[in-house]
Amino acid sequence: MRETDWERVVLLHEALGRVAPSPAVELNRAVAVVMASGPLPALDVLDDLAASGRLTGFYPLPSAGVIPGPAGMAHTLGMQPDRLPTRHPAPTPPPPDPPRVAWRKAMRERVLEEAWRLAAREGWDRVRVGDLAVRAEVSRPSIYAEFGDRAGIGAALVERESGRFLLGVAEVLDAHRHDVAAALEAGVAHALAESARNPFVRAVIAAAQGGTDALLPFLSSRPEPVFSQARELVDAWLAEVAPGVLAKRRLEATDLIVRLTVSHMLLPSPDAGASPARVARAACAVLVTNA
């Protein structure tokens, strides 16, 4: 006796349902789906049928498990109810933002994107709120209401870019999590490469070397947002991959690696290719110190 080709049976019942639809055909198709693909797809088929209303009043439908539950399907298939796989409902998507909130978010992103482009091309010193209003097609009062002042735009811009920047660093660290030294070296290398590649960061660093760009404090001397976020990222990562290291040493190593990386961004070493390894060695030396 040949083994039943249940996938073909499913196709045949689909064709039959299009030509001569009936409750019996639909339920038989669901059983064939069970045999071909398992109970979950069949329960989905029955859910669709019940929701469509096409089988309303058809008395075998409840026994199939759609109403009131999977027990009927289990009985139909000759299975114990507790042997059926559990179906987890899909998460409910969040409701859409009210129009005013959606407009505000879109406006904020447009302003930041135009500020990024201007700062990358001309430096932050040349970015003016009036220019941003024209380029982003919003009023100056709307910009001031959202950001407070020009410095607020700069802080928000650096926060956005630093978030993207640090996400990349986190991914690199996690890819090397089984070798702390290699991970720190790769993380520093990624940070330095991104600082050279990203036109916004390049513009800020180039201006900083001439001592002119007012956006630099957000990247270096002020505690927010880049320095503290980077320190929190590295410290949390070290706590996870090196739990035996003293907390004091971990914090010292974290502070050292972040400060040295930022320093190399601002003033690259003549032998820039060796910088990541040197920074990583210095941090690891602190980590293994017991005093």
Image (tube, rainbow, N blue to C red):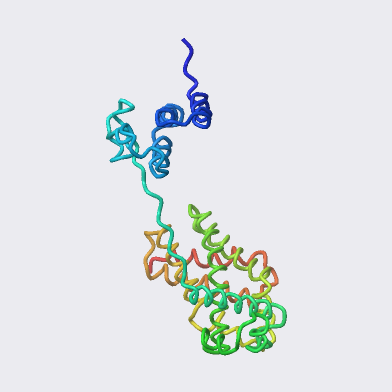
State the image quarter where residue 23 is shown: top left
State the image quarter where residue 53 is shown: top left
Residue at image position (52%, 32%) is 18
Q: Is residue 93 left or right of residue 181?
A: left
Q: Position of residue 227 (x, y in %)?
A: 50, 76
For the question of whether residue 275 can be seen, the reply is yes
Q: Is residue 243 left or right of residue 119?
A: left
Residue at image position (42%, 26%) is 35
For the question of whether residue 288 can be seen, the reply is no
Residue at image position (62%, 74%) is 264
State the image quarter where residue 250 is shown: bottom left
Instruction: Check the image and report above or below for 23 versus 289.
Output: above
Q: Position of residue 273 (x, y in %)?
A: 67, 64
Q: Is residue 27 left or right of residue 13?
A: left
Q: Work out whether residue 274 or residue 132 is closer to the camera in this orientation and state it.
A: 132
The C terminus sits in image quarter:
bottom left
Toward the right, the furthest residue is 121
Q: Is residue 65 left or right of residue 186?
A: left
Instruction: Check the image and report above or below for 249 versus 35.
Output: below
Q: Position of residue 76 (x, y in %)?
A: 32, 28
Q: Work out whether residue 237 or residue 116 is closer to the camera in this orientation and state it.
A: 116
Q: Total marks drawn?
A: 0
Q: Position of residue 219 (x, y in %)?
A: 57, 79
Q: Work out whether residue 196 or residue 104 is closer to the camera in this orientation and state it.
A: 104
Instruction: Check the image and report above or below for 101 versus 185.
Output: below
Toward the top, the furthest residue is 1
